[in-house]
């Protein structure tokens, strides 16, 4: 992890601390800039109280970078038991870096998000991994598409963890088989059905077999996109893999027949993963229309890449490179960073909220 420090961009241009940190001599010693960047990235605040000239923490004013001469002692007296109250108001006032009061947000017009996945034919251990890791950080709605003959212990587990389900007659299929391709398209019909604009602002879909959650997947997103009437958005996540012959061959299949018209849009791009998507309901509806109707003979990942690279989605589309954003698609060829506790990290060395295709290789530590 220490090897990453000098190459990380931890700048906060609105603060003078960025100027101090940009000096090479400060990169390994100025921990405060790491803390400032972390709090900004995670949208966190510090709690302050001012009990009559005392402080929760005081500067010892020792000789060094900021003070000359002898030790001056604390610059403020420390608070004692009874000096502060832990009886906080229902809404705390928030201030920006310049000590300007941040107006309170009206959340009456905010719709919640939802997490979706097709969980067809998997064992209880996979449900424990997906749902269990997610429920550590997120208590909102989860919808899973499951087999109609799913065992009783799985249905009980989902009920215990407040997971909503829809059942299907589809069964787990071999990778690459026609049945597997069909499931990949059927799931978008399920996503479109559940991703109701009257109920949800954002929908997150991720492949069930190989996804882990390490934080609230929605916490880093701009809260304004969750308001009623917000402009439509779609967030997508690339593999660290260039567009390849496999994709072009699928585009040439007679059932798909997209190569001649759309191959030019794919040149020089990275492959976008179809199993890691965050978007508004209208974006999911557009995807479902192409997956299930207009281009039903195409592979789902081919369909997604063509729609995005040819700019055919009516939404503000953001495509994240592998290792950036809320969903880290590790996969084959991905940049793999893990900390000393084996948690997956984005390329800025902060924890990846969602990790997809983490099992495509063997890796211990960074």
Image: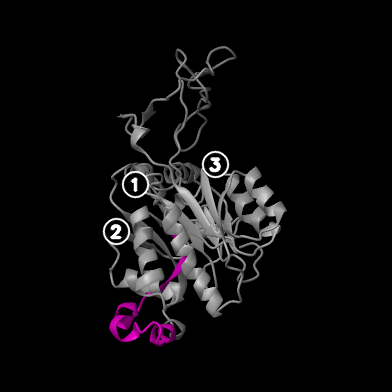
User: What distance separates the C-alpha of mark 3 from that of mark 1?
Assistant: 19 Å
Q: For mark 2, what is the residue?
A: 315
Instruction: Give percent across and percent down for residue 81.
Output: 60, 14
- Pick whichever of labels 3 and 1 is earlier in the sequence: 3
Callout 3: SS: loop
Instruction: Give percent across and percent down for residue 89.
Output: 45, 20
* Pointers 2 and 1 in contact (C-beta within 8 Å): no
Task: Choose top left, top right, bottom left or bottom right for residue 139.
Answer: top right
Residue 326 visible: no
Depth check, front residue: 39 or 147: 147
Disc 3 crowd rating (10 Å Cα; few below 14, some 14-19, many 20+) is: few
148 sits to left or right of 45: right
Magenta residues, start to end: 248-277
145 sits to left or right of 340: left
Residue 225, numbered label? 1
Depth check, front residue: 145 or 138: 145
Residue 139, numbered label? 3
User: What distance separates the C-alpha of mark 2 from that of mark 3?
Assistant: 28 Å
Callout 1: SS: helix
- Pick whichever of labels 2 and 3 is earlier in the sequence: 3
Q: How many marks?
A: 3
């Amino acid at each position: 992890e220490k090897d990453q420090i000098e190459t990380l961009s931890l700048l906060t241009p609105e603060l003078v601390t960025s100027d101090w940190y940009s000096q090479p001599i400060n990169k390994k010693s100025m921990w405060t800039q790491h803390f400032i960047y972390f709090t900004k990235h995670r949208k966190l605040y510090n709690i302050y109280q001012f009990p009559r000239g005392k402080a929760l923490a005081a500067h010892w004013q020792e000789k060094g970078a900021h003070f000359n001469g002898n030790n001056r002692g604390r610059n403020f007296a420390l608070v004692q038991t009874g000096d502060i109250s832990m009886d906080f108001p229902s809404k705390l006032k928030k201030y920006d870096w310049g000590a300007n009061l941040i107006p309170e947000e009206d959340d009456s017009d905010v719709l919640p998000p939802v997490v979706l996945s097709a969980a067809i034919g998997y064992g209880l251990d996979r449900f424990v991994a997906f749902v269990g890791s997610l429920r550590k950080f997120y208590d909102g709605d989860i919808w899973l598409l499951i087999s109609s003959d799913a065992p009783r212990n799985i249905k009980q587990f989902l009920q215990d963890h407040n997971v909503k389900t829809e059942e299907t007659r589809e069964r787990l299929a071999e990778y690459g088989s026609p049945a597997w391709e069909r499931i990949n398209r059927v799931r978008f019909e399920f996503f479109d059905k559940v991703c109701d604009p009257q109920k949800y602002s954002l929908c997150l879909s991720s492949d069930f077999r190989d996804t882990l959650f390490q934080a609230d997947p929605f916490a880093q997103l701009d809260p304004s996109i969750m308001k009623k009437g917000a402009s439509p958005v779609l967030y997508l996540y690339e593999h660290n893999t260039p567009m390849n012959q496999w994709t072009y061959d699928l585009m040439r299949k007679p059932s798909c027949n997209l190569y001649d018209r759309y191959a030019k849009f794919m040149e020089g791009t990275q492959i976008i993963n179809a199993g890691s998507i965050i978007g508004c309901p209208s974006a999911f509806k557009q995807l479902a229309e192409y997956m299930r109707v207009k281009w039903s003979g195409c592979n789902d990942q081919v369909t997604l890449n063509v729609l995005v690279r040819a700019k055919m989605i009516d939404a503000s589309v953001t495509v994240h490179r592998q290792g950036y954003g809320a969903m880290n698609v590790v996969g084959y060829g991905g940049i793999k960073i893990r900390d000393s506790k084996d948690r997956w990290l984005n390329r800025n060395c902060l924890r990846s909220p969602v990790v997809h295709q983490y099992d495509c290789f063997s890796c211990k530590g960074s």
